[in-house]
């Protein structure tokens, strides 16, 4: 199946968005297992100029692929928007073709976003990949992400595993969340798993308004505004979200507030109000631009 759409597939997949780890790449073809109505399909996609070569013709599969890579979003219109704003006009040069990399599995995005807090891209993607390998379902060389009810049953650490099993040596304990390198985030991951198993249906969030969805995600212990906005942007395609942390604060302060020290909360409010329906994309481009242009090093 050939799909025409401007995109930089490599940049999109490897831009650190917290929807999921990067897909497996072999000779320029990116692949992963995706569940459609709980049935596994191996998605393989390759880029040639403005065309994507997709291995499946199934309508549901094509629709899902378009969703994952946000192919219906009008990049040309967005670039005109950037070019009409002095502070943003250089960003498309560094980020051309980058799109949202949306989660096929919203629960995976919840756990990935929690794992990304105060963490490097390399570390959190390694941890999430290990969680999938340990407790997901295997299809060929790919693994699905475990469902919330399954992850809720996983031991937090080696001590809990040792005290709840017949293992004789604590050094042999590796069936626990902390063994995946998630550190202090393990209890938050379990709390999220329990919440979305027993109390809240994740599938309902897409039908909520932004404010209600935001407050719902904030109920997860350990999830603050930045992680909640990441979950809503990458897990549910709420493009009005503007995930804000210390780096986005520094960038926004430099571009719009003459370097003044402003709060992260004020930056979030500013971004949502200033950029509106483009807030999520502006944040994505802003962060990548700062990394690639040298601005981030300047602001350290």
Image (cartoon, rainbow, N blue to C red):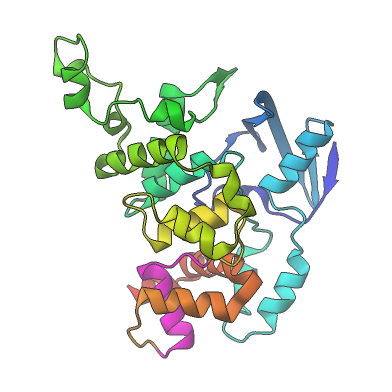
Pick whichever, 4 or 150, lies toward us: 150
Above or below, 256 against 91 in this view is: below
Q: Residue at x 34, y 36 (%)?
A: 190
The picture places residue 221, in percent across and down from the top left corner, at 32, 50
Which residues lie in the magenta part? 242-258
Pick whichever, 122 or 196, lies toward us: 196
Q: Tag count in the figure?
A: 0
Q: Residue at x 70, y 32 (%)?
A: 44
The picture places residue 205, in percent across and down from the top left corner, at 57, 50
Q: Can you see residue 21? A: no
Q: Quadrant of residue 81?
A: bottom right
Q: Is residue 171 left or right of residue 264?
A: left
Q: Residue at x 28, y 40 (%)?
A: 187
Q: Can you see residue 35? A: yes
Q: Is residue 167 left or right of residue 218?
A: left
Q: Is residue 22 left or right of residue 252?
A: right
Above or below, 125 against 224 in this view is: above
Q: Is residue 149 magenta?
A: no
Quadrant for the C terminus in the image: bottom left
Q: Is residue 253 magenta?
A: yes
The picture places residue 119, in percent across and down from the top left corner, at 34, 51
- Which residue occupies the extreme bottom position in the image? 258
Quadrant for the N terminus in the image: top right
User: What main secondary structure does the magenta stretch of the protein show?
Assistant: helix
The picture places residue 83, in percent across and down from the top left corner, at 69, 80
């Amino acid at each position: 199946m050939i799909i025409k759409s401007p995109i930089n597939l490599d940049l999109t997949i490897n831009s650190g968005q917290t929807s999921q780890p990067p897909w497996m790449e072999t000779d320029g073809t990116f692949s992963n297992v995706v569940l459609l109505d709980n049935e596994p399909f191996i998605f393989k996609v390759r880029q040639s100029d403005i065309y994507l070569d997709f291995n499946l013709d199934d309508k549901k599969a094509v629709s899902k692929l378009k969703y994952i890579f946000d192919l219906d979003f009008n990049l040309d219109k967005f670039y005109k928007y950037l070019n009409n704003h002095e502070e943003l006009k250089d960003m498309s040069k560094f980020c051309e073709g980058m799109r949202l990399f949306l989660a096929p599995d919203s629960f995976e995005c919840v756990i990935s976003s929690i794992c990304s807090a105060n963490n490097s891209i390399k570390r959190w993607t390694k941890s999430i990949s290990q969680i999938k390998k340990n407790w997901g379902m295997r299809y060929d060389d790919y693994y699905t992400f475990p469902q919330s009810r399954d992850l809720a049953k996983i031991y937090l650490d080696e001590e809990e595993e040792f005290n709840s099993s017949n293992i004789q040596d604590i050094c042999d304990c590796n069936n626990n969340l902390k063994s995946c390198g998630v550190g202090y985030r393990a209890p938050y991951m379990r709390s999220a798993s329990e919440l979305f198993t027993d109390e809240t249906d994740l599938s309902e969030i897409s039908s909520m308004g932004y404010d209600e969805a935001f407050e719902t995600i904030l109920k997860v212990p350990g999830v603050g505004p930045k992680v909640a906005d990441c979950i809503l942007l990458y897990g549910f395609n709420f493009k009005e979200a503007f995930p804000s942390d210390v780096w986005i604060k520094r960038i926004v302060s430099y571009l719009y507030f003459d370097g003044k020290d402003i709060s992260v909360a004020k930056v979030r409010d500013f971004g949502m109000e200033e950029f509106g329906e483009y807030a999520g994309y502006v944040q994505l481009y802003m962060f990548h631009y700062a990394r690639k242009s040298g601005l981030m090093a300047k602001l350290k």
